[in-house]
Every structure is written in structure tokens, then in C-alpha cells.
């Protein structure tokens, strides 16, 4: 925030196109899941540069990462930014929930008295907001013509210079390595917590065997398990997302299974010689079912899955994944009682 | 880049060409280029690329497009079972991945 500009509709706060070190640190923290739900800007109208009544109005969410992604692409330009109240959720997810919606667009246009700020009667909506916003209905309610902007904020300068026209390529959602990589920390940290909980339970269970409880048995049982769970997490939440286009099968569960199989081939030879066959089987099942399941959970982070498709995939995969996990737990516990 | 495809013959998307007025909204909003213009009407170019986001149906003012909109997110579907919402997927306040405006991050 760098002061205010005065408009017919009153003062409007000015923001810069330059991200500060603090903005970047905040964005980094959010990607690791730190204070993710309170990373917001106040909803309402902002001025970028020194906009006039002919400058474009760009609508976005009040999630700070969305807001920053927008403004940092517009250096040296003048524009109005209208942040909707999506409760700090990004455009795509908020559109799915309806908070980035027709009513909110119309409400914010009116609250900002936008017809007094600009003379062209056009708002540029992010294309990814379209599942929540009906452009024809926005026009009926607000009088403003809603033009669909590009999917990626980086294409905004070309879109604006082209007379608010997007090329077909600007309209397409892709899922390049870079975007998949960005999602990995969040997937990984979410699963690491669960893996730790499993380890704690396993540590308690592992102590029991012939002749009662022993600490040596806890370590002998749990250390290899830690390696197995780490390999499962790596396979399902890091390798599968990154290698996605090159893995066999259309279903995510199939792709995760393939990576789990490779992980098992690498990890099993390193299991201690004292590990029972039952526990080796448990380890293999954990990596196969676990990686497959975690990969399936990545459907929601991907950009090309449909609800109907995921339902079909889950009907095909979830039963054997659950059976595999239950069998793995049983085999692992039983394995503590045999040689 | 079109390597990343999901399942075929599964989406609920329907299109009634007779109702189309050629307004082009569906070709603007679809993130997967499912609709393109053919003369003065839209055609479904690649139905299996549809992710059932619902943008086209919501923006077609002439009732030519129908789809059961939802989010293709296994975690969300499982969460909805526990909330007892009967399969309806509702996103949690997540999705850090979409900061670049390219979607992603299970909602
Ligand atoms: S939005 Fe509807 S009326 Fe407009 S081109 Fe598409 S199908 Fe036709
Ligand atoms: S539902 Fe979404 S992905 Fe499917 S055709 Fe319509 S706009 Fe495209």
C-alpha cells in the first residue's frame, strides 16, 4: 500500500507492482502450509500505478497469493484491481464454492461505485472464476460487461495490449512440471504427519513379542518401517506428481501403484536380514497400496480430472487399497511374533 | 503437452446444438478447449477433456449445455462421506497451488 488516489467515488488505495521480500516470504510460507487460511487482503477496489477512467478493471480474489500474482505481472502499467471477498481462497477454488460468484461480482462493482471510477463499463474476470460467475448475469445485475481474462496472470499484459483478447493458448489450463513441483511441499507435509502418527502407534505395538515388551524390538521393528513409510510418502506425494505424464495408465491410482512398485524394488533389499517374511510382505503392500492411494489423492491438485472420473477411479481402486492397508497392518503385527 | 489426459467416456457433459446461438461464451470459459466455434455455432471438439467445472453451462445463457459440476478430488469426495453430504464435494479453504492462477491444490 502506497497512499491513495482520488476518484469520483472517493479515495482508492494504491498498491505497487513490486513484491517486497515480505510478500515473497509470505507466499513461500503459504506453500508449506503455514498460516494458509489467513493470507488475505481486504476486499474492494485498489489502484495500481496511476489509473484513469479508461484503465482496465481486473477482478481477483482476496487471497493474497492471487492478488500478488496479479499485481506483480503489471509493472509499469495502470489498472484498477477489484478484490472480491472469497475469504482468502484462490479464484479457482472459490469459484467452485460459489464465493467467487455472480452475486459477489455485482455487489463489489456496486460497493466500489465502479461506474463512477471508469467510463468503459467493462470488468476483466479471471477465466478460472467462470465456474462461479455467469458473465451474462453480471451484465444484467450490474450493467458491466464481463470479459474473460487469461488463465495465467503472466498473460495479462499481452491480453490487455491485444484489446482484451485472449489467444486459445491463454485460455488453456496446463499442468507443467513447475506447477506440479509447487504443490509437492503441501502434499508431503500433510502426509508426513500421518506417517509419524502411524510410526508412534507401530512403536507401541512393536515392543510386544515372545517374552513380553522389549525396547530392542521397538527399534528393530520401527526403524525399517520408518524407511518404508518415507519411501511410500516420497513415491506417492513427490515422485508420482512430478513424473505424472510419463507414468503408465490414466488413473492416478495406477500411476502411483507403478511408482510404489519401483520404490518397493529399491527399499526391500535394504530391509534388515532379521526382518520376517511377513513384515517384508507388509512393507511391500504398504508401498503399493500407500503410493497408489496418495497418488489418487493428488487428483484434486491436478488440473485435468473430473468428478465423474475420480468417482469411477475410486470405485475401482479404493477397495483394494483399503484391503491392502489392513492386510499390511495385520501382517506387520503378526510378523513381530515369528522369525 | 496434451499428454496429461484423464479417463475417457465418463463425464456428464451434454450439448444441444439446436439451442446454441453462437454467443461464444463456452469457448471463452472452458479451461480445456472442449468447445470451439464451427461457423456460427459451438461444437464439442474434445468431450473427454472436460473436467466438469460447470463454467460453460453457467455461462451459456441459452440452456444449450448441461453438466453435473463438481471437483475431481478424491480427498474431497472422501471428506464429504465423513461429513455425510452424500457425495457432494465441498472444498475446504485450501489450494495454495493456485496462486499462479493456474488452478491446482485440492480445494
Ligand atoms: S455458450 Fe451456449 S449459446 Fe453460446 S456458443 Fe456456447 S453453446 Fe452456443
Ligand atoms: S464443464 Fe468446464 S471443462 Fe467441461 S466443457 Fe464445460 S467449461 Fe469445459
Image (spheres, rainbow, N blue to C red):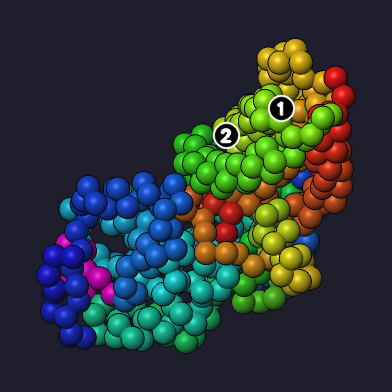
Q: Is residue A153 visible?
A: no
Between B2 and A275, the residue placed more toward the observer is A275
Query: Does residue A145 appear left or right of residue B51 in this picture?
Result: left
- For ligand 2, tell me if the residue under mark 1 lies within 8 Å: no
Q: Is residue A161 above or below residue A273?
A: below
Label 1 crowd bin: few (<14), some (14–19), many (20+), radius 10 Å: some
Q: Chain for mark 2?
A: A
Residue position marked by numbered label 2 in the rendering: A238
Image side of residue A81 versus residue A63, left or right: left
Find residue B88 and report its horizontal and vertical position in percent: 73, 68
Could you say where residue B57 lies in the image, as x and y percent from the top left?
66, 69
**With B6 as the anchor, is A78 left or right in this view?**
left
Q: Secondary structure at mark 2?
A: helix
Q: Residue at x 37, y 56 (%)?
A: A65
Q: Residue at x 56, y 73 (%)?
A: A98
* Magenta part of the chain: A45-53
Q: Position of residue A180 (x, y in %)?
A: 53, 39
Whether the magenta-drawn stretch holds residue A46 is answered as yes
- Toward which corner of the image does residue B61 lie, by quadrant? bottom right
Give the residue at x 16% y 80%.
Answer: A11
Quadrant location of the N terminus of chain A in the rendered image = bottom left
Residue at position x 36%, y 46% in the image: A28
Say above or below: A299 vs A64: above
**Closer mark to the observer between disc 2 and disc 1:** 1
Q: Is residue A226 within the magenta segment?
A: no
Q: CA distance from mark 2 to mark 1?
A: 31 Å
The residue at the far front in this view is A211
Chain where mark 1 sits? A
**The label number, if any, that marks residue A131 in the structure image:** none
- Along the polypeptide, which appears first: circle 2 or circle 1? 1
Q: Are marks 2 and 1 in contact (CB under 8 Å)?
A: no
Residue tagged 1 = A217
Amino acid at each position: 500500500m502506497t497512499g491513495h488516489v482520488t476518484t469520483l467515488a472517493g479515495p482508492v488505495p494504491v498498491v505497487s507492482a513490486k513484491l517486497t521480500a515480505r510478500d515473497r516470504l509470505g507466499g513461500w510460507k503459504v506453500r508449506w502450509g503455514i498460516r494458509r487460511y489467513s493470507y488475505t487482503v481486504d476486499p474492494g477496489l485498489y489502484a495500481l500505478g496511476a489509473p484513469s477512467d479508461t484503465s482496465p478493471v481486473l477482478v481477483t480474489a482476496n487471497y493474497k497469493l492471487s492478488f500478488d500474482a496479479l499485481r506483480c505481472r503489471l509493472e509499469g502499467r495502470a489498472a484498477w484491481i477489484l478484490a472480491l471477498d472469497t475469504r482468502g481462497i484462490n479464484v479457482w477454488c472459490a469459484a467452485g464454492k460459489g464465493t467467487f460468484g455472480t452475486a459477489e461480482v455485482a455487489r463489489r462493482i456496486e460497493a466500489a461505485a465502479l461506474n463512477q471510477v471508469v467510463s468503459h463499463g467493462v470488468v476483466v474476470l479471471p477465466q478460472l472464476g467462470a465456474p462461479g460467475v455467469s458473465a451474462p448475469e453480471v451484465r444484467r445485475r450490474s450493467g458491466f460487461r464481463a470479459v474473460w481474462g487469461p488463465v495465467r496472470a503472466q498473460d495479462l499484459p499481452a491480453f490487455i495490449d491485444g484489446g482484451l483478447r485472449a489467444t486459445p493458448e491463454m485460455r488453456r489450463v496446463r499442468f507443467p512440471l513447475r506447477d506440479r513441483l509447487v504443490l509437492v511441499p503441501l502434499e508431503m507435509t500433510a502426509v508426513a504427519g500421518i506417517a509419524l502418527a502411524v510410526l508412534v502407534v507401530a512403536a507401541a505395538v512393536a515392543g510386544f513379542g515372545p517374552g513380553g515388551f522389549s525396547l530392542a524390538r521397538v527399534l528393530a521393528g520401527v526403524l525399517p518401517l520408518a524407511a518404508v513409510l518415507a519411501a511410500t510418502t516420497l513415491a506417492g506425494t513427490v515422485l508420482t506428481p512430478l513424473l505424472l505424464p510419463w507414468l503408465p495408465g490414466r488413473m492416478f491410482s495406477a500411476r502411483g501403484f507403478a511408482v510404489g512398485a519401483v520404490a518397493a524394488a529399491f527399499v526391500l533389499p535394504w530391509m534388515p536380514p532379521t526382518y520376517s517374511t511377513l513384515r517384508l510382505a507388509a512393507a511391500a503392500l504398504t508401498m503399493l497400496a500407500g503410493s497408489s492411494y496418495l497418488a489418487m489423492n493428488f487428483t484434486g491438485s491436478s488440473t485435468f480430472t473430473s468428478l465423474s472420473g475420480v468417482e469411477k477411479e475410486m470405485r475401482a481402486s479404493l477397495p483394494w487399497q483399503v484391503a491392502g492397508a489392513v492386510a499390511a497392518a495385520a501382517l506387520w503385527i503378526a510378523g513381530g511374533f515369528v522369525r | 503437452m496434451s499428454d496429461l489426459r484423464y479417463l475417457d467416456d465418463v463425464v456428464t457433459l451434454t450439448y444441444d446444438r439446436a439451442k446454441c446461438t453462437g454467443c461464444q461464451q463456452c469457448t471463452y470459459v472452458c479451461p480445456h478447449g472442449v468447445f470451439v466455434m464451427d461457423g456460427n455455432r459451438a461444437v464439442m471438439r474434445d468431450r473427454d477433456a472436460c473436467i466438469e467445472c460447470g463454467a460453460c453451462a453457467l455461462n451459456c445463457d441459452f440452456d444449450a449445455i448441461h453438466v453435473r459440476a463438481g471437483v475431481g478430488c478424491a480427498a474431497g469426495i472422501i471428506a464429504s462421506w465423513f461429513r455425510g453430504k452424500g457425495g457432494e464435494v465441498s472444498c475446504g479453504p485450501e489450494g495454495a497451488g493456485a496462486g499462479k492462477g493456474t488452478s491446482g491444490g485440492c480445494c
